[in-house]
């Protein structure tokens, strides 16, 4: 393995304004319990856009500036600090970016994904580190070691795939019709997971035809442009007036959330993955929610590490072709091009190569 340099290139969030800076910073030394990774690939996520723009959501999730952004991180372990047993030099790893405390009620009795004292890798919360750098250190307990032969791009995509899987897995989709609202990377991956987990028919909605085209390639049976088509009317016709069995909400659009309950069948199930930016308002709560005796779930991140095990299998067995969501591969030094493409709405998932 090549010698470890003293300095490296990284993106840094320095100021409370729309920007990242491309800098030369020291390569961190792994402390007790930490592993040093060479970052092989890092994906850009919606939250990285919020952090770049420094919008209202960024101000909620970030604890402190400066930090290195990028949480969809694939790496190779190149050095271990004292006391590291869970990983070894040469391991290919994905980073569980929800840094759980291991002590709170959720960590002890439920799952670290929803830790009350959560640190967020790549978000400046309880760690300054992130994946948009040539190297990074991560406490070994947050690393998922890849057992199959997944490549770096597939590993970087496990983080968003895990979110999609976590949502779909809670919906008992086997043999059911599933409506997935929103065809960004998470929605597209949720559709593919729903098919892999045995959904009868997957109906995908978006407001952009280009995104619906990708949804069809990834396995959606029916696609609807909710700008030009009446989704509720279609769903009710498709189901003989019964309503849809399952809804996986991945648009984060408040009007979609507000109206989705009216399309659900009685006894149906909904999972909210998308993050609405406005307050919600359901018009007919009695008819559309309470009298439906529905099940409402939501997810934050992945189940640690159950989800990682499941999604690695799905990708390794070829059941989810995760690379189909990649729209751009960009050298990290050209990160401004990547964000411009995202702002213009031209991109699905963009992967950065930190070595270039
Ligand atoms: N719960 C979690 O842990 C978690 C993790 C990651 C992302 N998220 C959230 O999940 C959502 C999806 O993530 P993403 O990366 O795919 O985001 P994205 O912004 O790329 O995708 C959202 C998609 O919804 C579409 N959309 C907008 N309005 C719509 C409408 N009225 N009807 C149908 N589609 C509409 C957009 O065109 C876009 O394709 C976001 O809200 C994101 O913040 C949640
Ligand atoms: Zn992400
Ligand atoms: Zn905790």
Image: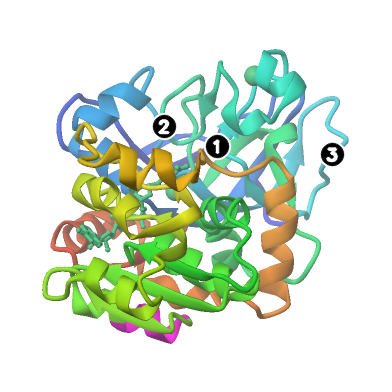
The residue sitting at 47% across, 68% down in the picture is: 178
Could you tell which of marks 3 and 2 lies nearer the N-terminus?
A: 3
Could you tell which of marks 1 and 3 lies nearer the N-terminus?
A: 1
Q: Residues within 10 Å of mark 3 (few under 14, many from 20)?
A: some
Residue corresponding to mark 3: 86
Of residue 177 and residue 114, the one placed in the foreground of this image is 177
Residue corresponding to mark 1: 6
Instruction: Classify residue 285 by image quadrant.
Output: top left
Q: Is residue 218 above or below residue 141?
A: below
Of residue 352 and residue 154, the one placed in the foreground of this image is 154
Residue corresponding to mark 2: 123
| SS category of the residue bearing label 2 | loop
Instruction: Classify residue 314 by image quadrant.
Output: bottom right
The residue sitting at 12% across, 69% down in the picture is: 227
Q: Quadrant of the N terminus?
A: bottom right
Q: Residues within 10 Å of mark 2 (few under 14, many from 20)?
A: many
Q: Is residue 185 above or below residue 250?
A: below
Instruction: Classify residue 96 by image quadrant.
Output: top right
Residue 304 rendering spot, x and y as whole percentages: 69, 40
The residue sitting at 23% across, 79% down in the picture is: 210
Highlighted range, magenta: 213-218
Could you tell which of marks 1 and 2 lies nearer the N-terminus?
A: 1
Residue 254 horizontal side relative to residue 100, left or right: left
Observer able to see residue 351? no
* Disc 1 versus disc 2: nearer the observer: 2
Q: Are marks 1 and 3 in contact (CB under 8 Å)?
A: no
* Disc 1 versus disc 3: nearer the observer: 3
Q: Are marks 1 and 2 in contact (CB under 8 Å)?
A: no
Residue 169 shows which numbered tag? none
Magenta region, main secondary structure: helix
């Amino acid at each position: 393995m090549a010698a470890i340099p003293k300095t490296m290139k990284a993106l840094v969030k320095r100021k409370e304004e729309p920007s990242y800076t491309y800098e030369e910073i020291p390569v961190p030394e792994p402390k007790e319990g930490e592993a040093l990774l060479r970052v092989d690939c890092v994906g850009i996520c919606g939250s990285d856009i919020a952090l770049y723009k420094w919008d209202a959501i960024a101000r909620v999730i970030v604890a402190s500036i400066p930090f290195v952004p990028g949480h969809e991180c694939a790496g190779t372990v190149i050095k271990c600090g004292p006391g590291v047993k869970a990983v070894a030099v040469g391991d290919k790893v994905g980073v569980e970016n929800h840094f759980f405390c291991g002590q709170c009620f959720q960590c002890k009795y439920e799952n670290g994904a929803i830790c009350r004292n959560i640190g967020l890798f790549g978000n400046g919360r309880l760690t300054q580190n992130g994946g948009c750098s040539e190297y990074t250190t991560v406490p070994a307990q947050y690393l998922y070691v890849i057992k199959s032969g997944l490549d770096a791009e597939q590993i970087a995509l496990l983080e968003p795939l895990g979110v999609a899987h976590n949502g779909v897995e809670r919906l008992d989709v086997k043999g059911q019709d599933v409506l997935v609202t929103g065809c960004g990377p998470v929605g597209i991956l949720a559709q593919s997971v729903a098919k892999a987990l045995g959904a009868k028919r997957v109906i995908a909605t978006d407001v952009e035809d280009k995104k619906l085209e990708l949804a069809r390639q990834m396995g959606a049976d029916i696609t609807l442009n909710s700008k030009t088509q009446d989704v509720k009317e279609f769903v009710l016709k498709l189901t003989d007036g019964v309503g849809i069995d399952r809804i996986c909400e991945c648009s984060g659009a408040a009007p979609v959330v507000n109206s989705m309950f009216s399309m659900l069948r009685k006894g149906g199930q909904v999972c909210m993955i998308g993050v609405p930016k406005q307050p919600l308002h359901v018009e007919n709560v009695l008819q559309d929610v309470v009298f439906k005796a529905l099940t409402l779930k939501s997810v934050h991140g992945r189940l640690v590490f159950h989800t990682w095990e499941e999604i690695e299998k799905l990708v390794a067995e070829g059941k989810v072709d995760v690379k189909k969501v990649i729209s751009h591969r960009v050298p990290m030094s050209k990160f401004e091009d990547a964000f411009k493409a995202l702002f213009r709405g031209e991109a699905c998932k963009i992967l950065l190569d930190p070595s270039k």
